Image (cartoon, grey):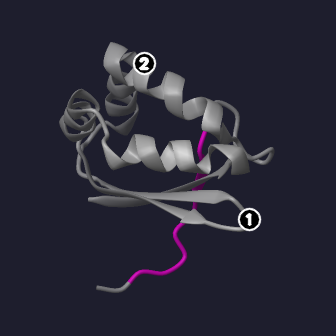
Amino acid sequence: MQRMGMVIGIAADKIDEYRRLHAAVWPQVLARIAQSNVRNYTIFLREPENLLFGYWEYHGTDFDADMAAIAADPETQRWWSFCSPCQIPLPSRAPGEHWAMMAPVFHTD
């Protein structure tokens, strides 16, 4: 299992919409996430900086293929069409990233 953290900005005027969307994530989107070996997925909001921090645990063996399956899913693409306009990618993100991946520094159980 691999713990993964990521960060992205959120537009201040879109926070309520983003909260509303995530209060009722579409079942097909949740199923695709699970099928792609992602577990314990949580998104945190930090105000007033307006940052979203995402955390998940990846339980698969081919991360790139699992992420490609999520990205190719038509229902997930439709979901992203609502969520993406709320988000502000960080200028420092790596090429090809939307959410900027973070390096683990510490963990304890």
Residue 28 in the image, given as x and y percentages of width and height: 22, 27
Q: Which residues are magenta?
A: 98-107
- Along the viewing direction, whichever of 25 and 39 lies nearer the viewer: 25
When the figure is inspected, residue 102 is found, relative to residue 91, above or below; the finding is below
Residue density around tag 2, few if under 14, some if 14–19, many if 20 or more, within 10 Å: few
Q: Which residue is mark 1?
A: 49
Q: Residue at x 70, y 46 (%)?
A: 13
Q: Identify which residue is drawn at 32% across, 32% down.
A: 66
Counting from the top left corner in percent of width and height, residue 86 is at: 62, 38
Task: In the rendered view, tell whether residue 74 sits above or below residue 49.
Answer: above
From the viewer's perspective, tell me whether residue 106 is left or right of residue 62.
right
Q: Verify whether residue 42 appears in magenta.
A: no
x, y (%) of residue 27?
A: 21, 33
Q: Which residue is mark 2?
A: 78
Quadrant of res 107: bottom left
Q: Is residue 32 positioned above or below 106 on the image?
A: above
Q: How many numbered discs, if any?
A: 2
Q: Report whether residue 97 is seen.
A: no
* Left or right, 81 with reference to 31: right
